Image (tube, grey):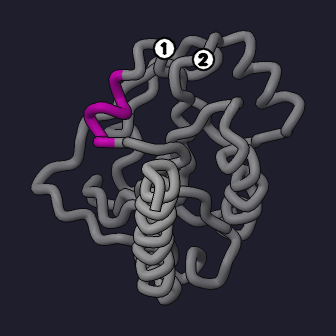
């Protein structure tokens, strides 16, 4: 076998190994995409919204809060936003809030995106990208469900259909 063929075989083997790990993770996650939060504390979250008003997670004590880290350039982030809006509509009248934390983009760009997409929930700006570090966000989108007591209960890595039965049941369990 040539060096090229050996390199190609090694690359394919590595790719298949990664694909196998992803498939195994997907199979495990099929039951629920909600991973229990295992950290001792809930990270702080205090940023400004699109109007420049300060907003903090602590302001929502008594409500279940979906915190979503996203960016306008992130296709999966954009794709899941309509389902987040549908979840919010489905839970109208419940103590439930969505805070979508934008990952370091200019306010004008975020505002134009939000208006075009008719987002309809709280958008927070994180120009210095400090919040993702505190929340240990490594990929976008990344989401966290915070219980009424202010403690993170679950995290979701990657795109999620927030209007799915599993998502609605999980949020409703935290509302009780």
Q: Secondary structure at mark 1?
A: loop
The magenta-colored residue range is 130-136
Residue 24, relative to residue 141: is it above or below? below
Q: Are marks 1 and 2 in contact (CB under 8 Å)?
A: yes
| Residue 78, percent from left and from top | 73, 44
Q: Nearer the viewer, residue 62 or 140?
A: 140
Q: Residue at x 43, y 58 (%)?
A: 6
Residue 170 visible from this viewpoint = no
Q: Position of residue 104 (x, y in %)?
A: 52, 19
Judge whether 132 appears above or below 30 on screen: above
- Locate residue 61 relative to residue 157 in the image: left or right: left
In this picture, is 99 found above or below 65?
above
Q: Is residue 129 visible?
A: yes
Closer to the chain start, of discs 1 and 2, is 2
Task: Name the chief secondary structure element in magenta.
Answer: helix
Image disc number at residue 68: none
Find residue 109 and report its horizontal and vertical position in percent: 74, 16
> How far is disc 1 from disc 2 in space, using C-alphas?
6 Å
| Quadrant assignment, res 107 | top right
User: Quick check: is 24 in the magenta stretch?
Assistant: no
- Residue occupying image coordinates x 77% and y 30%: 114
Give the residue pinned by disc 1. Answer: 127
Residue 54 falls left or right of residue 62: right
Which label number is shown at residue 105? 2
Q: Indicate the position of residue 63 as horizontal and vertical percent values.
A: 43, 57
């Amino acid at each position: 076998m040539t060096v090229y063929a050996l390199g190609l075989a090694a690359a394919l083997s590595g790719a298949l190994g990664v694909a196998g790990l992803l498939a195994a993770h997907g199979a495990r996650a099929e039951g629920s995409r909600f991973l229990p939060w295992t950290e001792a504390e809930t990270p702080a979250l205090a940023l400004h919204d699109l109007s420049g008003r300060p907003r903090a997670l602590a302001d929502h004590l008594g409500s279940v809060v979906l915190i979503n880290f996203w960016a306008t350039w992130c296709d999966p982030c954009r794709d899941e936003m309509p389902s987040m809006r549908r979840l919010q509509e489905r839970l109208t009248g419940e103590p439930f809030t969505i805070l979508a934390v934008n990952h370091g983009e200019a306010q004008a760009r975020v505002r134009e995106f939000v208006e075009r997409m008719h987002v309809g929930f709280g958008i927070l700006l994180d120009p210095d990208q400090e919040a993702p570090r505190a929340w240990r966000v490594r990929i976008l989108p990344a989401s966290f469900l915070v219980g009424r007591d202010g403690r993170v209960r679950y995290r979701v890595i990657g795109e999620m259909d927030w209007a799915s039965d599993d998502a609605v049941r999980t949020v409703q369990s935290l509302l009780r």
